[in-house]
C-alpha cells in the first residue's frame, strides 16, 4: 500500500474495532448488573477524568485552549457529545437487557452509512467495485433484518448516532484526545446530576463496601477511551468509507462472542449474511489496496 497515512489509519481503525467487538462487549456485559444509568454515568465520569490527566501529562492545554476558543468546533463537539452519550446509553441498555444481537445489527448498518456519508460530504472515491460491495452489504443487512424475531430498533438508533458522530468528527480538525476530552466535559454535568440521584436513592453499586465494583466501574473509563481513541485516529487518517468497512470487525466479533461464549443461537441465516458481508469487505479493501 502506497499511502502510509492510509495504512496507519487502517491499523488504528482495526485495533479500535476489534477492541469494541471482543473486550468491550464482554466487559460491559459483565458490569451490566449495575444498571444502564449507573454504568453510563461512570463511563462518562472516568472518561473525563482520564482525559483530563492525559491532557496534563502530555502538556496539551494550548491545544485545548485553541479548540475551546473556536466557536464552530466547540459547537460541533457539543453536538457530538450528545451523540456519543446517546450511543453509549443505547448500547449499554442493549447489553443489560440481552439485546446484543439487536444492537450489533446497528453496527452492520453503520458502515453503509459511513461510506455513503463519506461520498456525499467529503467526495471520497466511489467506483464500480466499491459500489458493488455496498450493494452486497445492503442486501445482506436487509436479509438479516427480516430474520430477527422483532424489529431491532436499538440497532437502528446505534447506527444513526454513531454514523452522524463520525461524520461531524471528520468535519473538524482537532486532536483526537482533546476532542474526546471536550466532549466528556460537556457530558460531565449531566453525569454528575444522575450520579447524585443514584446515591440519594441508594441505587448505587459504587461504594466502599464493594471494592471490586469500584474497580470495574472505574475501568469503564479506559475501556471507553482506548478503543475510541484508536478508531477516531483511524477515521481521521483513513476516511469515513475505509474506517466504516473495517468496522465490520466489531459486529462480527460480537456475533462470534455471543455464539462461542454466551451460547447465543447462530442461525444459518446469520452465517449466510456473514459470508456475503465479508465478501463485500474483501472487495472493498482489495480495491482500496490496489488504488492507494
Image: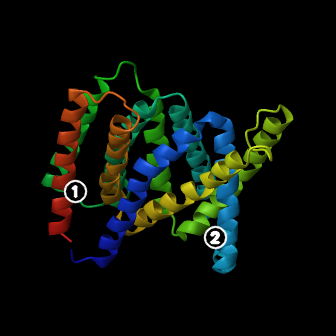
The disc at residue 126 is 1
Q: Residue at x 61, y 68 (%)?
A: 178
Q: Residue at x 18, y 54 (%)?
A: 282
Q: Position of residue 285 (x, y in %)?
A: 21, 59
The residue under the point 82% across, 41% down is: 196
Which residue sits furthest top? 149
Q: Quadrant of the N terminus?
A: bottom left
In depth, the one of 112 and 106 nearer the eye is 106
State which quadrant residue 224 falls in.
bottom right
Q: Residues within 10 Å of mark 1 (few under 14, many from 20)?
A: few
Front position in the image: 105 or 204:
204
What residue would you read off at disc 2?
67
Labels 1 and 2: the sequence-earlier one: 2
Quadrant of the rendered image containing residue 150: top left
Which residue is depicted at the point 36% across and 57% down?
240
C-alpha gap between disc 1 and disc 2: 32 Å
Horizontal arrangement in the rendering, residue 26 relative to residue 6 (left or right): right
* Residue 58 in the image, given as x and y percentages of width and height: 63, 79
Q: Position of residue 177 (x, y in %)?
A: 57, 67
Badge 2 density bin: few <14, some 14–19, many ≥20, Cα 10 Å: many
Q: Secondary structure at mark 2?
A: helix
Relative to residue 112, is residue 291 drawn left or right? Answer: left
- Is residue 50 shown above or below 206? below
Viewed as shown, does residue 33 lie left or right of 228? right
Q: Residue 274: horizontal and vertical position, in percent?
A: 23, 39
The kind of secondary structure element at disc 1 is: loop
Q: Nearer the viewer, residue 71 or 243?
A: 243
Q: Is residue 257 above or below residue 267?
A: below
Amino acid at each position: 500500500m502506497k499511502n502510509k497515512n492510509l495504512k496507519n489509519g487502517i491499523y488504528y481503525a482495526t485495533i479500535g474495532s476489534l477492541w469494541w467487538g471482543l473486550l468491550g462487549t464482554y466487559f460491559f456485559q459483565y458490569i451490566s448488573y449495575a444498571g444502564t444509568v449507573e454504568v453510563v454515568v461512570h463511563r462518562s465520569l472516568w472518561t473525563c477524568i482520564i482525559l483530563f490527566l492525559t491532557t496534563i501529562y502530555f502538556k496539551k492545554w494550548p491545544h485545548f485552549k485553541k479548540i475551546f476558543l473556536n466557536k464552530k468546533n466547540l459547537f460541533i463537539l457539543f453536538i457530538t457529545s450528545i451523540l456519543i452519550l446517546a450511543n453509549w446509553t443505547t448500547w449499554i441498555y442493549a447489553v443489560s437487557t440481552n439485546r446484543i444481537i439487536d444492537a450489533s445489527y446497528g453496527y452492520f448498518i453503520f458502515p453503509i452509512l459511513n461510506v455513503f456519508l463519506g461520498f456525499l460530504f467529503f467526495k471520497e472515491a466511489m467506483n464500480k467495485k466499491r459500489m458493488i460491495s455496498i450493494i452486497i452489504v445492503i442486501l445482506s443487512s436487509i436479509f438479516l433484518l427480516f430474520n430477527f424475531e422483532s424489529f431491532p430498533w436499538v440497532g437502528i438508533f446505534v447506527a444513526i448516532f454513531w454514523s452522524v458522530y463520525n461524520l461531524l468528527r471528520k468535519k473538524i480538525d482537532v486532536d483526537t484526545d482533546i476532542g474526546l476530552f471536550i466532549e466528556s466535559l460537556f457530558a460531565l454535568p449531566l453525569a454528575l446530576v444522575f450520579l447524585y440521584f443514584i446515591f440519594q436513592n441508594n441505587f448505587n453499586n459504587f461504594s466502599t463496601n464493594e471494592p471490586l465494583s469500584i474497580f470495574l466501574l472505574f475501568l469503564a473509563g479506559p475501556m471507553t477511551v482506548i478503543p475510541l481513541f484508536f478508531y477516531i485516529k483511524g477515521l481521521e487518517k483513513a476516511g469515513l468509507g475505509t474506517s466504516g468497512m473495517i468496522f465490520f470487525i466489531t459486529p462480527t466479533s460480537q456475533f462470534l462472542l455471543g455464539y462461542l461464549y454466551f451460547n447465543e443461537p447462530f442461525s444459518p441465516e446469520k452465517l449466510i449474511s456473514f459470508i456475503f458481508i465479508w465478501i463485500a469487505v474483501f472487495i472493498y479493501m482489495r480495491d482500496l489496496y490496489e488504488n492507494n
